[in-house]
Image (cartoon, rainbow, N blue to C red):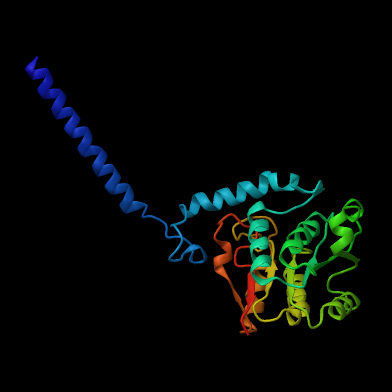
Amino acid sequence: MRRFLLLLVIALVLIGIGICLGVMVDRHLNPPVKPPAQFTGASLQPCPDEYVLTRFQQLWFESRPWAENRWLGIQTLQYPTDVWVTQEILFDTKPDFVVECGSYRGGSAAAWATFLKETNPEGRVISIDIEDRMGDARKLPICKERVDFLVGSSIDPKIVAEVTRRVTGKKVFVLLDSLHTKEHVLSELRNYSPLVSKGQYIEVQDTALSRHPIKAGLGGGAHEAVQEFLASTDAFMSDGSRNRMILSCSPGGYLKRVK
């Protein structure tokens, strides 16, 4: 019996040593991944393992739970985390106008108008799309009260001129969520950035596409447009604090005017 117990103790010790050695080898071969720079900060907890984070972002996008989201009954293709951050920006900056490029069915315009009603009683939304699919949204009281839908391309000189006429001299928040090619987004940034005053934001959505980290949209898009735009001006900076939710379709896409 004593011999059996002795062998059992030796076996347990050897198993323990084996486990410890295995952990040490694994840590040597697979060191912890540091969090991406945009997720670091004194007040933030370390983000999850980068591989897990990347795969979650990809699976969330590909499984499309966000495609069923609705605001006041209107389909709204937005990540809930990005909507939350947007309402925080609108509260902090209290713009007179939200200029939205990409209306889809008008659900997001209704959401921005709802937030504006509480943050700036005179605030309005101008929402632009090449297709008029906003019929149901137009029936909402909040849209009747605070939203103007413009049909046309966001980079059409006539549309840009009309938006400029309406918002000149006002505090303007711009949200870009229309065609996500690099050329189109860069053109939007160049056309609408002059309307944004110091302290206000341009929110560029879908910077996560083209493998940043979502695979869809290969060939360059919003992310590349943001990088080129920021390289051309010191008037804007990417506000990484607005990406604290980690799950976002707009990583690095919250551009704050600082000059």
Residue 77 as seen in the image, left or right of residue 34: right
Of the 4 image quadrants, the one containing the N terminus is: top left
**Taking 193 as reference, is 25 above or below it?**
above
> Residue at the spot x=80%, y=54% of the render?
107
Q: Tell me which corner region of the image, top left, top right, bottom left or bottom right, holds residue 224.
A: bottom right
- Viewer-proximal residue among 77 and 113: 113
Residue 96 as seen in the image, left or right of residue 233: right
Residue 177, how many percent across, how many down? 75, 63
Residue 119, how many percent across, how many down? 71, 65
> Residue at the spot x=17%, y=33% of the render?
13
Residue 36, how many percent across, how many down? 49, 63
**Taking 229 as reference, is 252 above or below it?**
above
> Residue at the spot x=54%, y=60% of the render?
244
> Residue at the spot x=80%, y=48% of the render?
72
Q: Tell me which corner region of the image, top left, top right, bottom left or bottom right, holds residue 168.
A: bottom right
Of the 4 image quadrants, the one containing the C terminus is: bottom right
Total count of labels = 0
Q: Residue furthest left?
A: 2
Residue 64 as seen in the image, left or right of residue 99: left
**Taking 75 as reference, is 8 above or below it?**
above
Q: Is residue 3 visible?
A: yes
- Viewer-proximal residue among 173 and 179: 173
Residue 24 as seen in the image, left or right of residue 157: left
Q: Is residue 220 visible?
A: no
Q: Tell me which corner region of the image, top left, top right, bottom left or bottom right, holds residue 246.
A: bottom right
